[in-house]
Image: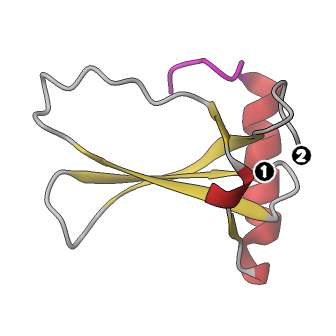
Amino acid sequence: MASEDDDTVRVWLVERTYSDDEQNLIILVYATPDGEHYFRKERALTSFSGDRRETTAALDVEPQQLGTVDPDDREQYASEARRMARIHDPDDPI
């Protein structure tokens, strides 16, 4: 589960949704390739044309920032994380 830096864990983008509750909020979910853990990142868009921050295929995060994936979602998250790792480099913009 460790990435190149032994103090972090590599997670891969598995889900991107737009919040129903907050206008201009994107919710990014990254997961470990085993589907056991996830990292959630929320991004507020300042404008549709002016926001230049890239979403990358993977992130390296601190282990304490990870949550435990619901057992019902683990297979789906694992499958998508492995697929992303297979077809993308970690820094690829998605």
Place residue 38 in its image quadrant.
bottom right
Q: What percent of the width, then of the height, locates residue 18?
A: 31, 57
Q: Is residue 76 above or below residue 53?
A: below
Q: Position of residue 39 (x, y in %)?
A: 60, 55
Q: Quadrant of residue 85?
A: top right
User: In the figure, 41 relative to 45: above or below?
Assistant: below
Amino acid found under the numbered disc labelled 1: Thr
Residue 4 image offset from top left, x and y in percent: 84, 24
Task: Characterize the local packing of mark 2: few (<14), some (14-19) or many (20 or more) Cα atoms within 10 angstroms.
Answer: few
Q: Earlier in the sequence, mark 2 or mark 1?
A: 2
Residue under the point 28% across and 64% down: 19
In the shown orientation, is residue 26 left or right of residue 58? left
Q: Residues within 10 Å of mark 1 (few under 14, many from 20)?
A: many
Total labels: the figure holds 2
- Residue 60 in the figure: left or right of residue 71: left
> In the displayed structure, would residue 76 be above or below residue 8?
below
Dominant secondary structure (helix, strand or loop) of the stretch shown in magenta: loop
What residue is disc 1 on? 32
Identified at 59% across, 18% down, the residue is 92
Q: Nearer the viewer, mark 2 or mark 1?
A: 2
Residue 62's disc is: none
Give the numbered dot on residue 1. 2
Q: Is residue 65 left or right of residue 77?
A: left
Label 2 with label 1: CB-CB less than 8 Å? yes
13 vs 5, left or right, is left
Q: In the image, what residue occupies the spot 13% across and 22% down? A: 50
Specify the amino acid type for callout 2: Met
Element on which disc 1 rests? loop
Residue 45, horizontal then vertical, whole percent: 19, 41
Residue at x-position 20% and y-position 26%: 51
Q: Which residues are magenta?
A: 88-94
Q: CA distance from mark 2 to mark 1?
A: 7 Å
